[in-house]
Amino acid sequence: MMSSVSVVVFAALMNIAPVEASFGFGGCPSQAVVDPFIETTFMGTWYEFGKSASLGMLFSRCPKIAYAAGANGLINVTEDWITWFSKGCKTGQMKKANPSKSEGKYSISFWAGAYNGKENNVTAANYNILNTDYSNYAIIWDCFNAFLFHTVSVRVITRERVPPQAIIDTIYKDFDSRKISRFGFVQRNQQNCND
Ligand SMILES: *[C@@H]1O[C@H](CO)[C@@H](O)[C@H](O)[C@H]1NC(C)=O
Ligand SMILES: *[C@@H]1O[C@H](CO)[C@@H](O)[C@H](O)[C@H]1NC(C)=O
């Protein structure tokens, strides 16, 4: 009885389209990351091509991200976007999850000073660079283990606001080979961004 009830609850959850892609049963799958990851080549301006559906996406467009060298080996992160009536911006920091490794596993936080005093410590990897060619695209992935299931969020950033189709094909081919669902992955509106 109990188990059939939970099956129904899960079936209901799975029918909520934007949520479906980010849910999976069992623990987080493992995904290979870029290694070695060349931080300095990754720096600079990117645009969010798409990401796992979230509420905030309804109210924003033209998301832009900049990574720059910050203090004490941290990376400064600046994100800005356009809303219906104005502009939004937030700043944060990023660090290597394990500073002694060359892999593309990072910790990101938008709390000021989140990593002060922890610059050389091992911190939770919540920003994993699965793939990048540095000059066109990067695929970023995070997974959260919950009881009996996990949620995945995936983000794709590109150097051009509207990348060429060949780059989009490359990105989705990588999704397929990693069994990352495209369902629930939403492309961002990067039209009429006034730049
Ligand atoms: C990085 O961000 C910190 C905190 O916002 C700021 O104080 C610092 O000036 C920034 N560094 C660079 C190089 O932009
Ligand atoms: C960072 O690591 C050092 C050395 O292991 C430790 O002493 C310190 O408490 C850690 N800092 C934080 C904020 O966890």
Image (tube, rainbow, N blue to C red):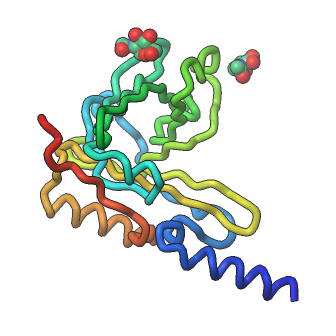
Point out the image quarter for the C terminus: top left
Give how far across and how far down residue 104 sits, in percent: 45, 41
Residue ID at (76%, 63%) = 147
Point out the image quarter for the N terminus: bottom right
Q: Nearer the viewer, residue 83 or 123?
A: 83
Residue occupying the far front of the picture: 85
Q: Nearer the viewer, residue 141 or 53?
A: 53
For residue 112, side relative to residue 131 (left or right):
right
Above or below residue 172? Residue 45 is above
For residue 70, side relative to residue 86 (left or right):
right
> Can the viewer see residue 116 in this picture?
yes
* Ligand 1 sits in quadrant: top left
Q: How many marks?
A: 0
Q: Which quadrant holds residue 79?
A: top left
Q: Which quadrant holds residue 114?
A: top right
Give how far across and how far down residue 101 sits, in percent: 53, 34
For residue 147, side relative to residue 135 (left or right):
right
Residue ID at (34%, 65%) = 174
